Amino acid sequence: MRVITGTYRSRILTSPPGTATRPTSDRLRETLFNILGPRVPGSRFADLFAGTGAVGIEAISRGAAHTFFAEKSPAALKSLNANLANLEITRNFTLEDRGTTALLQRLLKLAAPLDLIFLDPPYEDEDAYTQTLGFLGSPAHAAILAADALILAEHATKGFQPAERYGQLTRTRVYKQGDTTVSFYSHDASF
């Protein structure tokens, strides 16, 4: 696993042993960031259920202004912290080690909304998808999102499929790559 392009191009990232952490593949990360293109530089990016931090680190490498990581698994946190240290990334990021819910509550208090959010919970954890996307789509939490915010949810191609709509979030695109699918959501305040 490596950083695809940008400041940290081709640098190696580590992941914990075993299968408990499933990093987003290099190929999928490359495709997603090619789709996001010019939206990344200068953005406020969140990597929820960050695991090794590969997606958020890719955002940093491509010029995100600030990246928020949320992860609470001790093994994944160890890898995420090692990856940040090995790349000597010391600024323009926030790491919430109590997980996604704690980070989202924290972000509600900030004045600057997020532009891009990537979430990749364990594929079998339907509640994590429903709760996180429901939180982001709630009108009460709209301040957390920039007007043109984009939310990407990685999930299995077979099995649980996130809904078309979560409150004010509407699925606008589905990208499939083998066993993995990414659903793209946009914020629609008219709902």
Image (cartoon, rainbow, N blue to C red):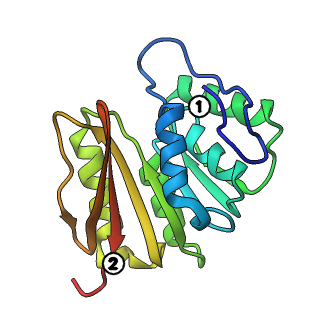
Locate residue 127, reporting x and y percent: 23, 45
Q: Say which quadrant the C terminus sits in.
A: bottom left
Q: Is residue 82 positioned above or below 62 on the image?
A: above
Locate residue 78, reporting x and y percent: 63, 26
Marks 1/2 in contact by CB < 8 Å: the verdict is no
Mark 1 and mark 2 lie on one chain; the one further toward the N terminus is 1
The image quadrant that residue 150 belongs to is: bottom left
Front residue of this view, candidates 2 and 149: 2
Query: Is disc 1 placed on a helix, strand or loop?
Result: helix
The residue carrying pointer 1 sits among few (fewer than 14), some (14 to 19) or many (20 or more) residues within 10 Å by Cα, namely many
Which residue is pictured at 79% across the width and 46% down the height?
A: 7
Q: Is residue 95 left or right of residue 10?
A: left
Q: How many marks?
A: 2
Q: Which residue is mark 2?
A: 140
Q: Is residue 5 left or right of residue 175?
A: right
Locate residue 55, reporting x and y percent: 56, 43
Q: Residue placed farthest to the bottom in the image?
A: 190
Front residue of this view, candidates 150 and 48: 150
Which residue is pictured at 54% across the width and 53% down the height?
A: 34
Q: In this rendering, does residue 150 appear at all?
A: yes
Q: Is residue 17 positioned above or below 100 on the image?
A: above
Q: Which residue is mark 1?
A: 77
Q: CA distance from mark 1 to mark 2?
A: 30 Å
Amino acid at circle 1: Leu
Amino acid at circle 2: Ala
Q: Say which quadrant the N terminus sits in.
A: top right
